[in-house]
Amino acid sequence: MINPKLLATFVEIIRKTSTELPKDVIDAIEAGRAQEPADSRGEYALKIIEKNIGLAKVKSQPLCQDTGSILFFVHYPRKLDGEVLAKVIKKAVVTATKKGYLRQNSVDSLTGKNNGTNLGPGSPTLHMEPWNKDYLDVRLVLKGGGCENVGAQYSLPDGRVGAGRDLAGVKKCMLDAVQQAQGKGCGPGILGVTIGGDRATGYLHSKEQFLRKILDKNKIPELAKLEEEVTAEANTLGIGPMGFGGKTTLLAAKVGVLNRLPASFFVSVSYMCWAYRRQGAKVSAKGEIQKWFY
């Protein structure tokens, strides 16, 4: 039996994710605007973005018409039934779609038909794991199609970009991904990157990097340095907000690492647009929101 309180909580998590950017993202966008020359196209683009952010929150309407892929990452108490929880989440998605927090955005890949519910194979995407704690850790990322389209995966060595099997090669891949994206990913963007893994786990882990905060510091010193260097160098490329030119091309780069097979060395790059819709909450087993994470 579905817990109505838990259902309402998941609907609220979806609403908040879709309509309100987290403070760390807003702060990064404002810092970017401050760096752009007065009356430049870059400053103008960021001012429009800031107005968009404010209106979406006040009106409780989606930040972007493309509410994107629905990616849930959930840890839940073992005493809860995982199948029932999945049904709660899916019903919350249908409810949020009816309320307008999510666009009717999931189509059959063979027929192109849209059933209007956002439910179907792979939608929403649920990554669910039981744990021994007595509360749920719920994280949600809404990732638009424009930024998803400019993700990239490299197999090193890659002679096209001159990348070898080392961190210098990884850096070249990351900067190449930014260069190739230009304004098509609705920048300023955020990179989520995985070194290693296979083609599937690399992309999944790269999206999990979006659960980190903008200003957090990687626990691995070499990766912390790489993140800082790539962000700084990307902002010298002149691509700027929405590809209009300027100093704010990337807000951050986040890098994770997975073990790999000796024969494979993948670098998986996911790109997130300025509408960095990521939210999470600590939720009691009864369905009460105890704490927002972002």
Image: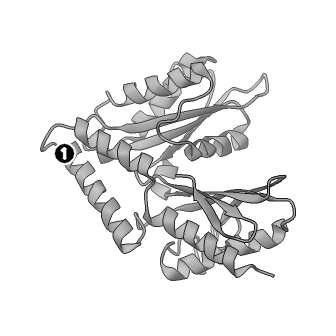
Color scheme of the displayed model: one colour
Look at 72% across and 31% down and name the residue there. 258
The total of numbered circles placed on residues is 1
x and y percentages locating residue 289 in the rendered image:
62, 65
Residue named by callout 1: 41
Element type at marker 1? Answer: helix
- Most extreme residue toward the left is 39
Please name the residue shown 40% across and 72% down the image. 61
Establish if 191 lies above or below 148.
above
**Is 169 or 36 nearer to us in this picture?**
36
Q: Give the residue type that dot 1 points to.
A: Arg
Question: Can you name the residue that lies furthest to the front here?
Answer: 290
Q: Residue at x 51, y 21 (%)?
A: 225
- Image quarter for residue 179? top left
Between 291 and 103, the one nearer to me in the picture: 291
Quarter of the image that includes the N terminus = bottom right
- Residue at the spot x=35%, y=38% of the render? 249
Circle 1 crowding by C-alpha within 10 Å: few under 14, some 14–19, many from 20: some
> Can residue 155 be seen by looking at this rendering?
yes
Q: Position of residue 263 (x, y in %)?
A: 77, 24
Expressed as whole percent of the image width and height from the top left, the position of residue 181 reads 42, 41
Measured as percent of width and height from the top left, residue 238 is found at 28, 32
Q: Is residue 241 left or right of residue 144?
A: left
Q: Is residue 163 visible?
A: no
Near-viewer residue (1 or 206) = 1
